[in-house]
Image (tube, helix red, strand yellow):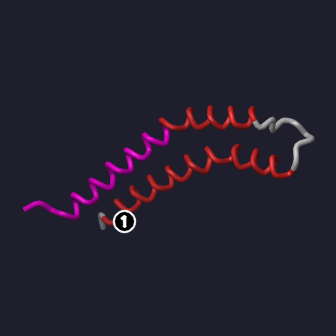
Amino acid sequence: MINKKAQVQFVALMFGIIVFVMAIALAPSLMDVSTDATTSMDCSNSSINEFTKGSCLLVDSSPFYFIGGLLAIVGLLIGAKIILEK
């Protein structure tokens, strides 16, 4: 008979690897989009209003949080695999 617990662990590991590859593949394009957005919003200008400064901060930090979130999901999937092995 097939061990269903082992199958679930293997599928979790495969999903973790897929999400990791997606995170690494999307990182350069997200950085390009972020750079283009900050350039078009003129974020280097010191006389912009507070709302634009907040938008610049959000756009600058969004790739970090998106890639970090994907890597956290990978960690959870692989961590669940390790925990469930016991």
36 lies left or right of 25: right
Q: Give the quadrant of residue 47.
A: top right
Q: Give the quadrant of residue 22.
A: top left
Q: Give the quadrant of residue 17.
A: top left
Residue shown at 86% from the left, 51% from the top: 50
Q: Quadrant of the C terminus?
A: bottom left
Judge whether residue 23 is colored magenta: yes
Q: Position of residue 24 (x, y in %)?
A: 49, 38
In the rendered image of this protein, does residue 44 appear above or below residue 14?
A: above
Magenta-drawn segment: 1-24
For label 1, the SS is: helix
Q: Depth check: give the residue in front, 38 or 64.
A: 38
49 lies left or right of 20: right
Hey, what amino acid is under mark 1? Ile
Q: Position of residue 76 (x, y in %)?
A: 44, 59
Q: Position of residue 20 (x, y in %)?
A: 44, 44
Q: Which residue is mark 1?
A: 83
In the rendered image of this protein, does residue 53 appear above or below residue 30?
A: below
Judge whether residue 33 is colored magenta: no
Q: Main secondary structure of the magenta part?
A: helix
Crowding at dot 1, Cα within 10 Å, few <14 / some 14-19 / many 20+, comes out as few
